Amino acid sequence: MSMITKQQVESMQPVQMFNGYVGAHMAYALHQIGLFPILEPKQRLGVRELAEKAKCDLPRLKALLRTGSLLGFFELHEGDTVSVTEMGEELRRDLGYFVWSVGGYGKMFQDMGQLSTASKAWSHLRDNGLVALGADMCNRSLMSELLYGVLDELDFTHIADLGCGNGGRLVQFCQRYPYIKGVGVDIAPAAIELANQNVAQNGLEDRLSMICANALDTFQSDQYKDVMETVEVLTCFMMFHDLYNIESIRDTIFDRLRNAFPNIKYFLIADTLKMPPKDSLEQLPIFNVGYELVHDFMEVQIPSQDDYERLFTASGLTIEKCIDFGVPNTYLYLLRA
């Protein structure tokens, strides 16, 4: 294999930075007006009809579409119609990244200069709902089929999800596997409220239970012992790095989990890990630069793949599978307990 030199990763020029900034905000605007669910693949639609369906001001919608056309995402045709280009279909698939960044962390990105010069709080600058929505959109468009490819091969009847959010993932599990039951754990009361609504709307009250608690407190409590004793598969998506950053429990986290879930067979853990050094990359990937930047400002260490695998091995787990999980430098681990 030939060596990749630093010269192969080209620096971003100011023109690319500026146009990318404009394009990112345009992409988030498309999400806000719900354009992609209206303008289907390979469809040519009148701009006026699109404005009516999206409830948009026609001149401003035209401005967004013109910008999108200049950037290569739309094609404007005679008769004042529009269609999505091949590049636009990639944007449709990747729209969750822009909901996460512009919507979820936009205010934090804008205030990083102030945050750098003073010890200011940052949490109010993050929109947790949009961060979660962006992650869920990426999950549906980039990760779901890969996940099912692993779960379909497992023999289980009870599953738990740490950091379950609005419970959407557990609802999907129950819809795909009609014989299973599950439990969700999340620290946020608002998330659990939404999860319970989601469960009720899907008629899954007899199959899914939602627990509002700090995961670490839950591990040490007998309150939920009965439901935890039934769990065979424990999932944790995109939040294990938060547990990893609690140094006092890092080396014992899986012991705690096995104590809390005594019949556990498998851990299924997905997370975005630290990028390789720039001089080993052919090009910078989408997402990771921003992901690492905001976590640096939050003083959250992003582990490397080696960090995780050392922890898994030291905890007595067997790595059954490790697959690329849709998002760059993101991996799905199937660990046998």
Image (cartoon, helix red, strand yellow):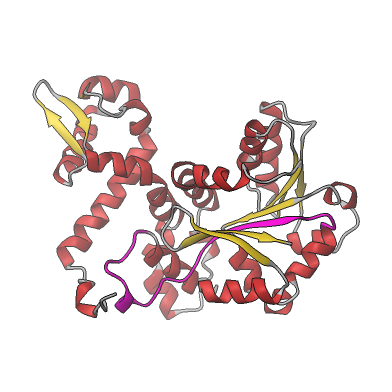
Q: Where 153 falls versus 306 (above or below)?
A: above
Q: Give the quadrant of the N terminus.
A: bottom left
Which quarter of the figure has residue 157? top right
- One can see residue 303 in this view: no
Q: Give the quadrant of the C terminus.
A: bottom right
Residue 216 x, y percent position in the rendering: 76, 64
What is the count of numbered marks? 0
Looking at the image, which residue sits at the far left? 78
- What is the chief secondary structure element of the magenta stretch? loop
Magenta span of residues: 261-286
Q: Is 272 contained in the magenta span?
A: yes
Looking at the image, which residue sits at the far front? 1
- Judging depth in this view, the residue of 333 and 260 nearest the camera is 333
- Judging depth in this view, the residue of 141 and 179 nearest the camera is 179
Q: Is residue 163 left or right of residue 325?
A: right
Residue drawn 70% across the image and 30% down it: 178
Residue drawn 37% across the image and 42% down it: 93
Q: Is residue 213 left or right of residue 69?
A: right
Residue 169 x, y percent position in the rendering: 61, 42
Residue drawn 62% across the image and 41% down it: 152
Residue 198 x, y percent position in the rendering: 65, 34
Residue 17 x, y percent position in the rendering: 22, 63
Q: Is 40 contained in the magenta span?
A: no
Which quarter of the figure has residue 42? top left
- Judging depth in this view, the residue of 170 and 245 nearest the camera is 170
Q: Is residue 271 left or right of residue 291?
A: right
- One can see residue 18 in this view: yes
